[in-house]
Amino acid sequence: MGKTVIEKIIGRNMGREVRAGEIVTVNVDWVMVHDIFTPFLAEKFAEMGFEKVWDPDRVVFVYDHMVPASQVDDIRHFRAGDAFAETYGITHVHRSDGICHQLMTEAGYVKPGDVVFGTDSHTTTYGCVGAFSTGVGYTEMASILGTGTLWVKVPETIRVEVEGTLPAGVASKDVILRLLGDLRADGATYQALEFAGSTIEAMSVASRMAMSNMAVECGAKCAVFTPDAKTAAYCGIPLTERETSLAGDPDARYARVIRYRAEELEPVLACPSQVDNIHPVKERLGTPVDQVFIGSCTNGRLEDLQAAARQLKGKKVAPFVKLIVTPASRKVYRDALADGTLAVLAEAGAMITHPGCGLCCGRAGGILSDGERVVATNNRNFLGRMGSSKVEIYLASPATAAATAAAGVISLPEE
Amino acid sequence: MSEAFTARVWVLGDDIDTDIIIPTEYLALKTIDDMKPYAFSPLRPELAGQIQPGDVIVAGKNFGCGSSREQAPEVIKALGVRCVIAKSFARIFFRNAINNGLLLMECGGVQDAVQEGEEIQVEPGRAITCGGTQYPVAALPQNLLDILEAGGLVKAMRKRNGLE
């Protein structure tokens, strides 16, 4: 009987064979904690009576949701994180380097086959390099910091195969949105997604990240991609059998197999106010917008900003439309500065902000008011997510978002 | 936690996400009690003020989806909600609720029978009774019952560390 990717990763971690449905206690390779939860984490850790962190070198703190501070009390969260790090010897503290989910792989922490937990639902992102990663609350995180372990149920897997060449103007974001529409918001609850096929193989690691990032939006515990030469180059490691063997076996047991032809996919939108309310962009053409947001842990990478710049080169953002561009990390910011991408966007009239989560989580940097409509590249369009609960949020790819910013109405990307 | 009880019901729909349960803008408030008035505010701003201790929430599928914020089950517990009954729960919310000692019950069918404001009979881990009809409840795995039994994950860890 063959194994799914997730059965192989958890089995390797346990040092024995495991099957979907088993409850096991895994050994944790990395944990990530972001600024929203530092005070609560410190409180729970003390309450539990732990004297030390199991392995301070395996702990990463990232300040991103509240950076730069937008409320006078925000500093409480940074102070709580700094004090905890100082007390327990945690040295991986990122105070303004970018969004946690970008940094965990970009800064060289998570590698293929690792088991990772973070205090954020989009921790599923690191499946882009073939890791098992998922979100937990701060109470569970406190227990992980004390014990280095966590119980999990080995998830069943939904295998998603995409074959062929994506049409021009169709991005990995359109693929994952289409999948969310088909699976619905609870269609993969407690399960793993495993992506495969020639379309997936042709994608960059950055494109895969947008997909593993949004896996949680259909309830998935995690999403995994088989590591390949691109993964190895991105992670700065040699590609060996240890990585390439993290592929689903032909005789593995899957809960479901879903297949797509890339040629049949098209630019889509998640319409207000559910992530699974998916419609083709062509059905919403001409809808006026007040703001466009390009950024977040879903679509704030260099290739995303480049895709936006291609749409906006030599053009201006439509009058009265606010275009906000937020690179996912300081590295992305510098790279986009160096290759001229930011110049194109600034020339077009974009407001370029410091890397962080502010607008996507409705805290700062362009939050919206009653009656406004936004097209955004982030991962959630829930009521009140980006400001007032009377805002219409449409989720889209960076190319669709940028084309919309230029036209001032929902538009298809130009080829 | 296993005693049967009667409770007044508040009815919510499918896919109640944690941004609805407690919006991000209130997460920086200092205590869970400070957050209480804003629970469910994007959907029903008046609800937090109407819920009385001992009430229960009956919802559809995928309750607690979205952000991992643990303040979501905590604020529900702080409002005095005795349990949440839903067709299904999102996984992070599910774990967070158990870890904080908030009783959850997976149950389908009762959603179509109950009206907001009515009373139902709740037998934790066994059944919900509404209008004379009994609806079965999914059983919890042993490792979760152990955490609930200990009074939540903090107490379970204190016991492990020889403090209780």
Image (spheres, coloured by chain):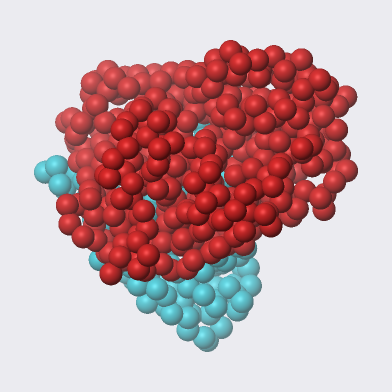
In this view of the protein, which residue sits in the foreground, A19 or A204?
Answer: A204
Specify whether residue B78 is in view: no
Residue A169: x and y, percent?
A: 71, 41
Residue A390: x and y, percent?
A: 75, 43
In this view of the protein, which residue sits in the foreground, A97 or B90?
Answer: A97
Shade representing chain B: cyan
Q: Residue at x 40, y 20 (%)?
A: A94
Q: Residue at x 52, y 48 (%)?
A: A200
In this view of the protein, which residue sits in the foreground, A97 or B83?
Answer: A97
Residue A108 as seen in the image, left or right of residue A199 = left
In this view of the protein, which residue sits in the foreground, B30 or A385?
Answer: A385
Q: Is residue B114 above or below residue B10?
A: below
Residue A309 as seen in the image, left or right of residue B131 = right
Location of the N terminus of chain A by quadrant is bottom left
Q: Residue at x 63, y 54 (%)?
A: A262
Q: Is residue B96 above or below residue A183?
A: above
Query: Outermost residue, left direction?
Result: B162
Residue A343: x and y, percent?
A: 69, 14
Location of the C terminus of chain A by quadrant is top right
Q: Residue at x 55, y 18 (%)?
A: A335
Chain coloured red = A
Q: How many marks?
A: 0
Specify whether residue A311 is in view: yes
Q: Is residue B50 above or below residue A367?
A: below
Image-quadrant location for residue A35: top left
Residue A309: x and y, percent?
A: 71, 25
Image-quadrant location for residue A218: bottom right
Q: Is residue A134 above or below residue A251?
A: above
